[in-house]
Image (cartoon, rainbow, N blue to C red):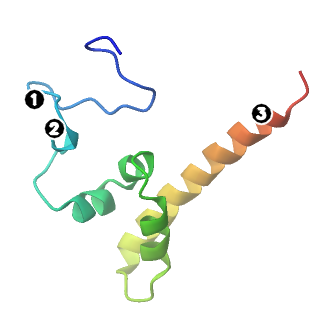
Amino acid sequence: MPSGVFIDGHIAAPEGVLDIDFFSHCLERGAHRALVIAYPRSGLLQGAEPYLRWLAARRDTLSDVAASLREALQEWDDTRDSRFADDRSPR
């Protein structure tokens, strides 16, 4: 892939930050789990769906955190469902 070209869904590093690895994309300092919880849509793009679903369903997850995760997961499901429907439409 040519330099400066990224795959679909790539989240650019903040302005002024060299884009070299996943830490380049972190807007805050913190553990990867904490950042995935704070930014679940980004986590979903990076493959954290099973972890986020598990966390959203846990009884001891803070209610506001669980609600945020469920909202992101619902948007994720809706997007995937619409893509699947588009793929099944007659051509």
Instruction: Give left or right: position of 21 versus 69.
Output: left
Location of residue 56 in the rendering, given as x and y in whole percent from the top left corner: 46, 73
Q: Amino acid at mark 1?
A: Val
Q: Amino acid at mark 2?
A: Ser
Residue corresponding to mark 1: 17
68 and 41: which is toward the camera: 41
Structural distance between the alpha carbons of marks 3 and 1? 38 Å
- Farthest residue, direction front: 1
Instruction: Give left or right: position of 84 versus 12.
Output: right
Up/down of 18 relative to 75, above or below: above
Q: Are marks 2 and 1 in contact (CB under 8 Å)?
A: yes
The tag earlier along the polypeptide, 3 or 1, is 1
The tag earlier along the polypeptide, 2 or 1, is 1
Location of residue 72 in the rendering, given as x and y in whole percent from the top left corner: 48, 56
16 and 67: which is toward the camera: 16
Q: In what quadrant of the picture does the N terminus appear?
A: top left
Location of residue 31 in the rendering, given as x and y in whole percent from the top left corner: 17, 62
- Farthest residue, direction bottom: 59
Residue at the image position 13 percent from the left and 50 percent from the top = 28
- Farthest residue, direction top: 2
Local SS, label 1? loop
Residue at the image position 41 percent from the left and 58 percent from the top = 48
The quarter of the displayed image where residue 10 is located = top left
Local SS, label 3? helix
The tag earlier along the polypeptide, 3 or 2, is 2
Up/down of 51 relative to 90, above or below: below
The quarter of the displayed image where residue 74 is located = bottom right
Residue corresponding to mark 2: 24
Residue at the image position 38 percent from the left and 55 percent from the top = 40
- On residue 87, the disc is 3
Q: Are marks 3 and 2 in contact (CB under 8 Å)?
A: no
